[in-house]
Image (cartoon, grey):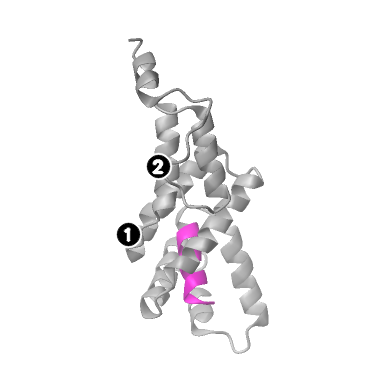
Amino acid sequence: MTPERAAYHALMLSVGFRDAFEQEFDEALEVEDPISDLILALTTVTTDINATIAGLRHFCREQPPDLEQVYDLVWKDLIGRFRSGILDDLGLVNMAWTLAELAEESWGADWWSFRQLSYDYETFLDGFIQHSDYLRARERFLAQLPLSPDLPPDPQKKPLLRRILEFFHL
C-alpha cells in the first residue's frame, strides 16, 4: 500500500467509509508475498477502527504522501458515491467539509474546493445565491474543475444587491 492510499484510507475510515479499505486490505492479504510491514501490522488492529486509522497515519508520518494524489483519490471517491446515490447533496457537502478539515488537521493540506462547495451550499440555503448557482458550482466540483467564487454570471440571475434587498423584503 502506498502512502497516498494509506492517507486516503485513513481519511475515508475517519468519516465511516470502510468498503474501499476492507477490499484493498483483503486483496493485499491474498496477493502480497511477502506481506508488507504495514499490512502485517494492520492485521492485529483491523477490528478496532481507531487503531487502524492510527496505524495508517503512523505509516504516513514515516513515508509522507503526495497530498495532490490523496486529494484526487478522495475527490474521485466522493464523486462516485454521489453519482451512485450513496451521498445526496447534503451528504456530499458535509463529507467534503469534514474531509477538508481532517486533511488539514492530519497533513496541513488546504483543500479549498472542498470547503468552497460547502460555502456555496450554505450561501444557497441562506438565500444569497440561487439554486442554479449552487448547481453550477456542484457540477464544477463533480467535473473536478476548480471552484471559483467568481464564476461567470448566470444570464437568468438578478444582481446580488437586488437579491439581498428582495430577501429582506426591501
Residue 80 on image: x %, y %: 62, 52
Q: Between tags 2 and 1, which lies in front? A: 2
Q: Residue at x 64, y 42 (%)?
A: 85
Q: Is residue 74 magenta?
A: no
**Comes first in the chain, label 2 or label 1:** 1
- In the rendered structure, which amino acid carries the disc numbered 2? Pro
**Seen in the image, is 42 located left or right of residue 163?**
right
Q: Quadrant of the N terminus?
A: bottom right
Is residue 145 in view? yes
The residue most toward the bottom is 34
Within 10 Å of disc 2 (Cα), the crowding (few <14, some 14-19, many 20+) is few
- In the rendered structure, which amino acid carries the disc numbered 1? Glu
Circle 1 residue: 105
Residue 123 on image: x %, y %: 40, 32
Residue 34 versus residue 96 in the image, above or below: below
Q: Which residues are magenta?
A: 1-12
Question: Label 2, label 1: how many angstroms apart (C-alpha)?
Answer: 24 Å
Q: Is residue 8 magenta?
A: yes
In the image, which disc is placed on residue 53?
none
Residue 2 on image: x %, y %: 51, 77
Circle 2 SS class? loop
Circle 2 residue: 149
Q: Residue at x 52, y 81 (%)?
A: 40
**Seen in the image, is 164 located left or right of residue 35?**
left
Query: In this view of the protein, which residue sits in the foreground, 57 or 144?
Result: 144
Residue 165 versus residue 74 in the image, above or below: above
